[in-house]
Amino acid sequence: MKALTLLQAVNDALKVEMSNDKNIIVYGEDVGVEGGVFRATEGLQKLYGEERCFDSPLAESGIVGTAIGMAVAGLKPVVEMQFDGFVFPAFNQIVTHVARMRNRSRGTWSLPLVIRFPYGGGIRALEHHSESTEALFAHTPGLKVVIPSTPYDAKGLLISAIRDPDPVIFAEPKRIYRSVRQEVPEEAYTLPIGKANVVRVGDALTIVSYGAQMKEVLEAAAKLAQEHINVEVIDLRTIYPFDRQTIIDSVKKTGRFLVVHEGPTNFGVGAELIAAVNEDAFLYLEAPPTRLGGFNVTFPLPRGEKHYMISTDRIVRKAKEIISY
Amino acid sequence: MFEKYDPREGKRLQLMDEKGKFTPNGGPILNDDELLDAFKKMLYARVADEMAVSYQRQGRLLTYPPLKGQEANQVGAVLALKKTDWIVPTFREHAAWATRGVPLYNLLLYTYGNEEGMNVGKDFRILPVSIPIASQTLHAVGIAYAMRYKKEDSIVLTYVGDGGTSQGDFNEALNFAGVWNVPVIIYIQNNQFAISVPRFKQTAAKTLAERAFGFGVEGVQIDGNDIQAVYQAVKLAADKARSGGGPTLIEGFTYRLGAHTTSDDPTKYRSDEEVKQWELRDPILRLKLYLISKKKITEDDISKMTEQFKKEVDEIFRKVESSKDPTPEDIFKYHYKEMPYELKRQLNEYKTYLEEGK
């Protein structure tokens, strides 16, 4: 066991998997010599050579488009988009080919590739460096979307994503890249994609969240506990396919539901989860299932981002509203 | 490799002219038996293409993109490849599919509206039809990277149209191919029109081939209606790629004698005279004149062959018409290796609905 940050856990996952499987190729902008602008791929080129970890030309569509070809031909590309807001030049390749190749060929060509990128705000960044785009990908048939919230989960989920026969969008919460260290096994291990994690057991309310937002959700749960309100907290971990069963089981127990996410509220992940709760746990509900999401506004530049980010206090307030409904 | 045919000097590779005669620089690249075989393949593609258009007109087939006039670009190129080389097509390469040996049934079934047509297995080393313009050129570059990485002796040929050269993906593909120096041929079928938009509105460059040089890649323009020029250029580019020489951009200068698709009316954007001029440069016509002059074939042989091909295509299309439509399972089950719960749930709900309606 080593105490690693989430960022180091990502790096560690790539390291151990690349040593296990020679077909894994890692590339993107600045990922080779520099090891990525956040250093997620640091040391890989030294360990595995320039053929397996390298700097590509600065063109996201080119990165994803060529990864499709590599995957068709039996390699397992793990490519990096430098930031969430730079994934859009590749959006056409992702939506029109990555997500569809398997269905288009009736199963002949599957694309075992991973598209990694740091996502989310709260890091006082330039425009286009703070986006939460998971709903765009979760809405696209044929993709899997994974977002870890801890170092342990990041390593296990990334290894699962690399071994998955289907394409995986792997969004990494950059705001908490370095904020917490956690004991992480040195060897390779996997966590199931499509399975949520109940990280705190409670009976007053079910709160679902994921990624960087888990930090404030857990802080809110601790604050509520001081007032003897025990909420259940679920880390979704996989956005699609989402773990309906774990959520429904929890809501049937608590009778109350709150989903919290940084991405824009309207047509977001929260809307989908609330629909699931209404479909399968309606008669158990004591209060309207509720979402607390980012505003449907362009993510503000640093001076204004404090208004956008969802604070611990806002979650506490919302939780109390639902509980006293 | 193609120094003698630098497109920036206005040079275009042509080995056989419109009359079926070898040009001064030309000469036989393929022997007469090989040319006869190529002729049959082009004729088969022509017959299948014309019949597909007529099925569409009869309301029996859906939107279809005709390739009439472009056959040499496809038959010649695929003949110059090894069976282990990859083909990454767009949506107008039926002759390339047929030359590679993929049953016509599959393409017609796909055009008929059933994805099952693209389920041709991996052995043909051809990717499914790709409709987003120029996007497939990047896939070809990725496959080429994989071939080199795995030390396979295979190269990749991808098609794109003249309109496709305006897309970012085409430019990124050339750029990645150049930087990575991977074994890929990007073959532009410059058929002069992107639906209705003429070639000169796509780029101020005099030729499409010369665009390669800005990427540090070699480019050559060839007469795409001269099957020997196509064969020669692809063979040389393939040999170069195989020996580590990297990518080549080939511009096949050709013409789409038919419409963009069966939903298009080309009389709106080009004159009959122009089309007539290009009919005289038909790739099949010139090979026919040559083969007749060499007594390898007669007009009578060709009519018989045409009738025979028509019968074959019609039998195939009748099979397509009697094929089963996809089941609800079929439209669900190929998105993921293992169907996620949410898809199972939607499928089951729909099946219950169907059952209850009975």
Image (cartoon, rainbow, N blue to C red):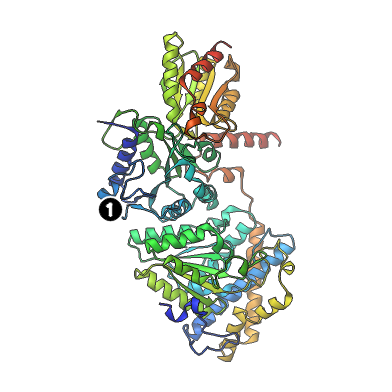
Position of residue B51 measured from the top left corner of the image (x, y, whole percent): 68, 68
The C terminus of chain A - image quarter: top right
Would you place residue A176 above or below residue B81 in this image? above
Would you place residue A281 above or below residue A194 in this image? above
Position of residue B84 measured from the top left corner of the image (x, y, whole percent): 41, 66
Would you place residue B37 above or below residue B268 in this image? below
The N terminus of chain A - image quarter: top left
Q: Amino acid at mark 1?
A: Gly
Position of residue B169 measured from the top left corner of the image (x, y, whole percent): 51, 57
Q: Work out whether residue A275 can be spotted.
A: yes
Q: Tell me the residue at 57%/43% (across/down).
A: B332
Which residue is situated farthest in the front direction here?
A: A303
Which residue is situated farthest in the top direction here?
A: A228
Q: Work out whether residue B84 can be spotted.
A: no
Q: Nearer the viewer, residue B149 or A218?
A: A218
Q: Nearer the viewer, residue B45 or A298?
A: A298
Q: Nearer the viewer, residue A88 or B68?
A: A88
Q: Tell me the residue at 60%/20% (across/down).
A: A282
Q: Nearer the viewer, residue A232 or A252?
A: A232
Q: Quadrant of residue B260?
A: bottom right
Q: Is residue B225 left or right of residue B235?
A: right
Q: Tell me the residue at 46%/10% (across/down).
A: A229
* Residue marked by disc 1: A49
| Chain that bears disc 1 | A
Q: Tell me the residue at 43%/34% (across/down).
A: A124
Position of residue A48 measured from the top left corner of the image (x, y, whole percent): 27, 50
Packing grade of label 1 (10 A; few <14, some 14-19, many >=20) is few
Q: Is residue B28 left or right of residue B351?
A: left
SS class, disc 1: loop
